[in-house]
Amino acid sequence: MRLFNAYTDYLKREFGCRVQKLSINAGFSCPNRDGKLGTGGCIYCDNKIFSPSYTDPQKSIRQQLLEGMDFHKIRYKTEKYFAYFQSFSNTYAPLEVLQQRFEEALSVEKVIGLIIGTRPDCIDEKKLDYLAELAKNHYIMVEYGIESCYDKTLKTIHRGHDFATAQKAVLMTVERNMHCGAHFIFGLPNETETEMMEMVHIINQMPIETIKFHQLQIIRETEAEQMYRKNPEIFPLFSNVEAYVDFIIRFIEQLNPDIMIDRFASEVKPELVVAPCWENLRYDQLLVIIEAELAKRKSHQGNNWKSEIYIK
């Protein structure tokens, strides 16, 4: 039995097999890049660092998915896939554009659903109503990049919206009986470890189904790199793997055990990272370390969780 509520395990139970996410770059933009809110994006943002080689907005969505299937079949024997709209803000377009791109993805054989990564301020009632219609016959997950629960942090990283916007987007999504996930980043400027740890109590009150954690990594040629080189002390980075593992375990010990964990950390090519300079550790290796440490501590997700106001 695993010591945390793993999203991958849920998918295997639900669909009877491994379901592989296939990343797509559908050519969407972001209000923080096209001038609506700003032009530089969030301080840490560089979509290229997590986009597979087969993702190219010049290719059709169908072609990207087929190439993704070829890419992954070498490693996994997968018969079912999710089209993962990952790059930039994937609801930031008129509804008719979303309809064309999402339905093209769902028309590809073996694609059984969509994972849609977006910003909380790029959704509205009409878009969610459309997605809810798709969800009647397909698995539809909306993942919101929330990043922090603190407005002061969201302002510092040039996010362009407040935490209340994220809370509203999540509620509008789950009210339509859709799957809803959230991303959070640890190590953002001027947040203390106490503040980061206290976010778990806020998260426990959100009706999210899945969660992804990312440790902040300072990526070359981003605004975060400029800020870090000028004032490194404002970034509460985790200097080594051991420090992050200790933090994340203490965090998930307080996390509602009903929330499924999709990721514990981000993985970036070492040559792109300015700081923190961890050893060249792959995500699957980090996962083994986290699970081993949980076992060593005789602990598990929710071990110290106290039932809080939690809206299902």
Image: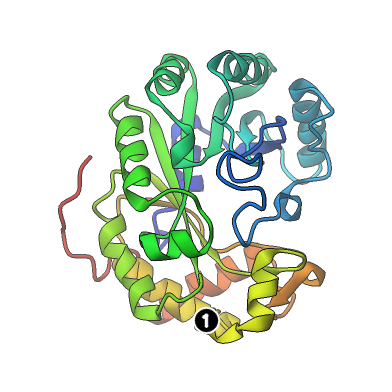
- Disc 1 on helix, strand or loop? helix
Residue at left 55%, top 34%?
A: 115
User: Would you place residue 50 above or below residue 213 in this image?
Assistant: above
| Coordinates of residue 9 in the picture (x, y in percent) | 47, 46
Q: How many marks?
A: 1
| Coordinates of residue 160 in the picture (x, y in percent) | 49, 49
Residue at left 64%, top 78%?
A: 228
| Quadrant position of the C terminus in the picture | top left
Q: Nearer the viewer, residue 21 or 58?
A: 58
| Coordinates of residue 240 in the picture (x, y in percent) | 60, 84
Q: Is residue 300 visible?
A: no
| Coordinates of residue 71 in the picture (x, y in percent) | 81, 39
Which residue is denoted by mark 1 in the rendering?
234
Q: How would you rate the neighbour count of disc 1 (Cα within 10 Å): few for under 14, some for 14-19, many for 20 or more?
A: some
For residue 307, what is the image quadrant?
Answer: bottom left
For residue 103, what is the image quadrant?
Answer: top right
Q: Is residue 133 visible?
A: yes
Amino acid tagged 1? Ile
| Quadrant position of the N terminus in the picture | bottom left
